[in-house]
Amino acid sequence: MSELICYCFGYSVSDVERDIAENGKSTIMERIMVEKRKGGCQCATKHPQGR
């Protein structure tokens, strides 16, 4: 399993690599930011280091 880079939404390094291969760039950060603005971020509880 690829290392998670986003515990809130379950994105991994492999997800970013695949996104870049499919889109020429990664759109994952944009998706994360949209969800954070909607209040969907749970880093404080889901990330092992609380960030």
Image (cartoon, grey):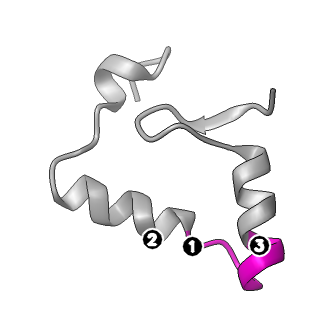
| Residue position for label 2 | 30
Is residue 22 on the magenta stretch?
yes
- Inspect the image, locate mark 2, and give the three-letter code of the amino acid beneath it: Glu
- Inspect the image, locate mark 1, and give the three-letter code of the amino acid beneath it: Thr
- Inspect the image, locate mark 3, and give the three-letter code of the amino acid beneath it: Ile
Give the alpha-carbon distance from disc 3 to disc 2, as whole Å.
Answer: 13 Å
* Viewer-side residue, 45 vs 23: 23
Which residue is drawn at the image coordinates 44% and 41% (left, top)? 9
The location of residue 31, given as percent across then percent down, is: 42, 65
Give the alpha-carbon distance from disc 3 to disc 1, as whole Å.
Answer: 8 Å
For the C terminus, the quadrant is top left
For the N terminus, the quadrant is top right
| Residue position for label 1 | 27
| Residue position for label 3 | 20
Q: In this view, does 21 lie above or below 7?
A: below
Is residue 6 on the magenta stretch?
no
What's drawn in magenta, residue-wise?
20-27
The location of residue 35, given as percent across then percent down, is: 29, 57
Q: In this view, does 20 lie above or below 15?
A: below
Give the alpha-carbon distance from disc 1 to disc 2, as whole Å.
Answer: 5 Å
The location of residue 45, given as percent across then percent down, is: 31, 18
Which residue is drawn at the image coordinates 20% and 60% (left, top)? 37
